[in-house]
């Protein structure tokens, strides 16, 4: 399993946060790649070597950092015979690292694992749960250690990914039930439901930059598809991989990158669908791609 940070040219290495990956019985490598999406065949260059991996009883599929430095880390945890999960929300990476070293318990305790999450605002987070629920958590009494929860449980399988269509209001989630759902977090309602959007489970979603209607999804059916909020079928099949696609992210309004089960990281231009360009190949699945701009 491989997790990547990708940056555009012109961003200094010092501005890139190398996420802390905790794992159980897995080895996660983190590399920083330099992509130039404006050329016909994007070039890649390995910028630095992978950081040291920290061993733990946790597997961390979710690391989110806000512009103000706040950090959301979600995880799945093996306790006895069962997988549980949770999340920590702290004001900075340094604060989180100190608490992990000191063995501080998770701020949010879940009875299932969590595959993804995001900040809604300064006092709310949304977590995708393995039970199919979408949990909205907020702190009370001005304390990050106390939480109240609202659960929206309409996915029929693991919720794999989430992204924001309209910050603070509309969020799109995808799951292994092959469904896509759009949530109004102010009204706690599912306002759009795309049933059987793919033929197999959906593993990733990414909202198009500067758009509140278009988003991309990827699935174990090997397809990467473009969607419009107002249409119940894909607008465009952007790419088809040789194996199930695990993750997808936009580089800009035309270029995107995706990683698959065979360990291939590829890019594709929305204006030339079907013509994906392999960038790198690794010995295991590419699990997550994160784009960080300067």
Image (tube, helix red, strand yellow):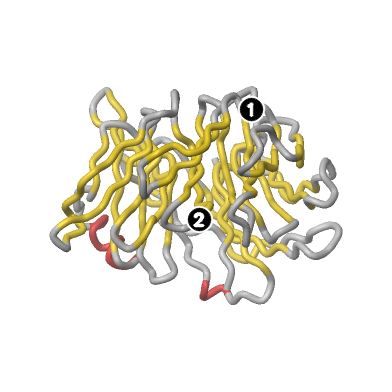
> In percent of the image, x 52 and y 37: which residue is there?
192
Q: Quadrant of the N terminus?
A: top right
- Residue 138 screen position, x and y as percent: 26, 52
Q: Residues within 10 Å of mark 2 (few under 14, many from 20)?
A: some
> In percent of the image, x 41 and y 35: which residue is there?
25
For residue 166, which numbered disc appears in the image? Answer: 2
Q: Nearer the viewer, mark 1 or mark 2?
A: 2
Left/right placement of residue 294 relative to residue 256 reads: left
Q: Quadrant of the C terminus?
A: bottom right
For residue 276, which numbered disc appears in the image? Answer: none
Left/right placement of residue 128 relative to residue 219 reads: left
Using the rendered image of the protein, determine whether residue 162 is visible from the camera's viewpoint: yes
Residue 135 is drawn in which quadrant? top left
Q: Nearer the viewer, residue 168 or 102?
A: 168
Rounded to the nearest whole Å, what is the CA distance between mark 1 and mark 2?
Answer: 24 Å
- Residue 236 screen position, x and y as percent: 76, 40
Q: Nearer the viewer, residue 90 or 24?
A: 90
Using the rendered image of the protein, determine whether residue 261 is visible from the camera's viewpoint: no
> In percent of the image, x 86 and y 59: which residue is there?
40
Left/right placement of residue 130 relative to residue 287 reads: left
Q: Secondary structure at mark 2?
A: strand
Q: Give the mark nearest the N terminus, 1 or 2.
A: 2
Residue at mark 1: 198
Q: Secondary structure at mark 1?
A: loop
Q: Residue furthest left?
A: 141
- Residue 51 screen position, x and y as percent: 48, 59
Q: Is residue 189 above or below residue 63?
A: above
Residue 276 is drawn in which quadrant? top right
Q: Residues within 10 Å of mark 1 (few under 14, many from 20)?
A: many
Give the total number of marks visible in the rendering.
2
> In percent of the image, x 55 and y 46: which residue is there?
288
Q: Nearer the viewer, residue 130 or 237?
A: 237
């Amino acid at each position: 399993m491989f997790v990547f940070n990708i940056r555009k040219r012109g961003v200094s290495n010092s501005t890139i946060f190398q996420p802390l990956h905790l794992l159980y019985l897995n080895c996660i490598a983190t590399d920083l790649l330099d992509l130039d999406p404006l050329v016909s065949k994007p070039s890649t260059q390995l910028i630095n070597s992978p950081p040291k991996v920290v061993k733990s009883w946790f597997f961390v599929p979710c690391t989110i950092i806000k512009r103000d430095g706040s950090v959301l880390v979600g995880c799945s945890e093996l306790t006895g015979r069962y997988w549980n999960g949770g999340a920590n929300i702290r004001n900075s990476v340094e604060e989180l690292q100190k608490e992990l070293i000191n063995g501080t318990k998770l701020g949010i305790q879940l009875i299932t694992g969590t595959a993804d999450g995001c900040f809604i605002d300064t006092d709310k987070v949304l977590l995708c749960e393995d039970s199919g629920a979408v949990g909205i958590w907020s702190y009370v009494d001005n304390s990050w250690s106390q939480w109240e929860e609202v659960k929206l449980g309409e996915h029929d399988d693991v919720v794999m990914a989430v992204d924001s269509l309209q910050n603070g209001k509309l969020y799109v989630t995808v799951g292994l039930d092959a469904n896509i759902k759009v949530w109004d977090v102010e009204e706690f309602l599912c306002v759009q439901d795309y049933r059987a959007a793919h033929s197999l489970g959906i593993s990733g979603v990414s909202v198009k930059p500067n758009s509140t209607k278009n988003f991309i999804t990827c699935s174990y059916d090997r397809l990467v598809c473009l969607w419009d909020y107002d249409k119940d079928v894909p607008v465009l099949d952007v790419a088809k991989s040789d194996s199930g696609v695990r993750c997808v992210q936009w580089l800009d309004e035309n270029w995107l990158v995706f990683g698959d089960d065979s360990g291939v990281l590829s890019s594709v231009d929305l204006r030339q669908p079907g013509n994906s360009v392999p960038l790198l190949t690794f010995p295991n699945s590419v699990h997550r791609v994160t784009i960080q701009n300067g």
